[in-house]
Image (tube, rainbow, N blue to C red):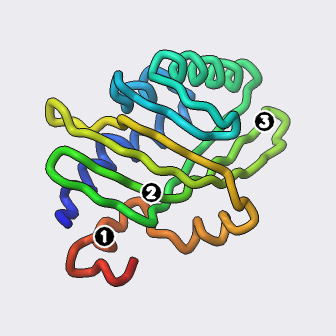
Amino acid sequence: MDTDLLRQLNDDIWHPFQLAYAKLDAPAFLELHAPELIRAGGPAKQVSGFADYSAQLEKWFTELADRGSSVTIAFRFVERIASKDLASERGIFHIVSKRADGDERAFYGRFHTYARRTDGRWRICSDYDTDERPATLEEEFHAAVDIDDVEAFSTHDIARV
């Protein structure tokens, strides 16, 4: 696989995703998603389109900011497949939520996204996540491939993954 595609995905989606989460910047976060987005799973076990997901996300970020809370997210990958204009990526995320009083909670979950490159930019078209099997997720997170280790998914090194 062309590791340049994975670097472009990191630059267009994954690094900005983490930054938007940390800043609670809903407009920047939503810009990473295509208008035809299908969002499924999550703790609520529901499926929604861009408009509903946007409203939920904006409300959540606003509530966090109003309470003085913060949230960070990190990704590690178990599979990254990309062609010129399409990508499928699976992995494990780690969210740390911190309240204004200092109380901190960590969550892990699995994700699977499909992205499409249009007008020279990658955007998420489909995003599914789940928190199933939480007992093993922390271990699996640390065993998965770091977001910036794109070489782990190159054709010549595929046996490592």
Which of the labelled discs sits on residue 71, or is there none?
none
Q: In this view, does 79 lie above or below 12?
A: below
Between marks 1 and 2 in the image, the one whose residue lies nearer the viewer: 2
Which residue in the structure is indicated by mark 1?
153
Look at label 3 and name its amino acid.
Answer: Arg
146 to 12, vertically: above or below = below
**Helix, strand or loop status at disc 1:** helix
Q: Judge depth for marks 1 and 3 and give the one in front.
A: 1
* Mark with earlier residue (1, 2): 2
Give yes or no for contact between labels 3 and 2 (Cβ–Cβ under 8 Å).
no
Q: Residue at 26%, 39% (x, y): give it.
A: 116
Q: What residue type is labelled 2?
A: Arg
Question: Which of the image's four quarters has the C terminus?
Answer: bottom left
Residue identifier under label 2: 90
Instruction: Please name the residue shown 23% across and 46% down the image.
Output: 86
- With 50 as the anchor, is 156 left or right in this view? left
Q: Earlier in the sequence, mark 3 or mark 2?
A: 2
Dot 2: element: strand
Find residue 82 and report its horizontal and vertical position in percent.
25, 55
